Image (cartoon, grey):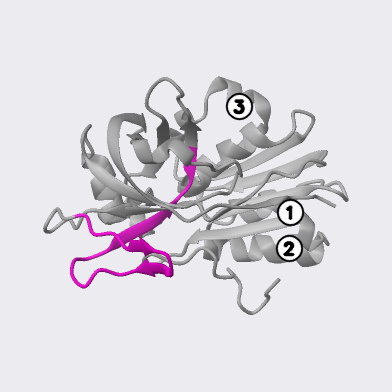
Amino acid sequence: MATRDHLRHDMAIRLLTVSHVDQLTPSMVRVTLIGDALEDFSAPGPTDHVKVFFPDPTTGTLTIPELRADGLHRPTDGVIISRDYTPRQFRPAPFGAAELDIDFVLHAPDAARGNPTDPAGGGPASAWAAAAHPGDEIAVAGPRGSRMAPRDVAEAVLIADETALPAFTRWLDLLPASTRITALLDVADEEVEPYLSAEQLKRASVEWLYREDGPGQLDEAVRSLDLRPDAYVWAAGEASTLVPVRRYLKHDAGLHPDQLDVQGYWKRGIVNRDHHEPIDPSDPD
């Protein structure tokens, strides 16, 4: 069975400054953050996440909880706006400024076809990222813990939509070099492809599934996989889309719970969904 070690981190809320912004694809940007508070930052797991606090778009005021000895305390005034994001890459710098990269989906990739994706992607987080400039301030809390990549996996299947691409690339970085990786990437169209580098594309056998070509492709692609009995499968993206995928892998393919990790990063029609919630309450783990 796949073994994933767990690490706990001390809670911290870090006030950080934008160093620079890079346009990765027409719908994704990378915001690089710096600040002395990053000195003890750690996120060694492929599915680690941080909570990012954004300024109120109406007032421009950044409101964050106060961290005290007995936990987090909400301020008596101000609007707290936060979303969960994968820390794409952290670069400690003993002789300079440490840097933290966070990648943002700028808009709902399917909005033009009446099929909105990440509600946060079309809201204040997306608006902030689209307008971010060096010197802007935001706050980042966490991660509270890390689940490490399994050490003993011969075959891994990674499934992701746009919102999960940062975590997908962390899997590529952190799985053992000996692991054979198959990737099913469920994206709006081919404009997303430049997000992956040539080196990353060599690391996995990647199948791009374009939603503009019609529904049901992901489910069909998963069912066509020839899975080894000891394969490890990670999937993340829109929760409703992943329900039939999870049911097939759990019940028909017969994967053990230790071999399967399916996470609903967002859900169509739900704003700021807690991704810790089960994607299929009728069939819990």
Q: Is residue 241 above or below residue 29?
A: below
Indicate the position of residue 87 as horizontal and vertical percent values.
47, 42
Query: Disc 1 marks which residue?
Result: 223
Residue in the foreground of this view, choosing between 126 and 9: 9
Q: Nearer the viewer, mark 1 or mark 2?
A: 2
User: Residue drawn 37% across and 43% down?
Assistant: 104
Instruction: Give the residue at the far left of this rendering.
Output: 59
Q: Nearer the viewer, mark 2 or mark 3?
A: 3
Q: Is residue 180 left or right of residue 6?
A: right
Within the image, what quadrant is residue 206 found in? Answer: top right
Asked if residue 102 can be seen in this view, the reply is: no
Q: In the rendered structure, are the residues bearing label 2 and label 3 in contact, judged by CB atoms less than 8 Å apart?
A: no
**Sequence-first disc among 2 and 3:** 3
User: What is the secondary structure assignment of the residue under circle 3?
Assistant: helix
Indicate the position of residue 164 as horizontal and vertical percent values.
51, 47
**Sequence-first disc among 1 and 3:** 3
The numbered mark at residue 201 is 3
Query: Disc 2 marks which residue?
Result: 248
User: What is the secondary structure assignment of the residue under circle 2?
Assistant: helix
User: What is the secondary structure assignment of the residue under circle 1?
Assistant: helix
**Region of the chain picked out in magenta, as a range:** 62-88
The numbered mark at residue 129 is none
Magenta run includes residue 83: yes
Q: Amino acid at mark 2?
A: Tyr
Residue in the foreground of this view, choosing between 217 and 203: 203
Instruction: Give the residue at the far right of this rendering.
Output: 229
Residue in the foreground of this view, choosing between 129 and 236: 129
Q: In the rendered structure, are the residues bearing label 1 and label 2 in contact, judged by CB atoms less than 8 Å apart?
A: yes
User: Residue drawn 50% across and 41% down?
Assistant: 166
Indicate the position of residue 141 as horizontal and vertical percent values.
41, 53
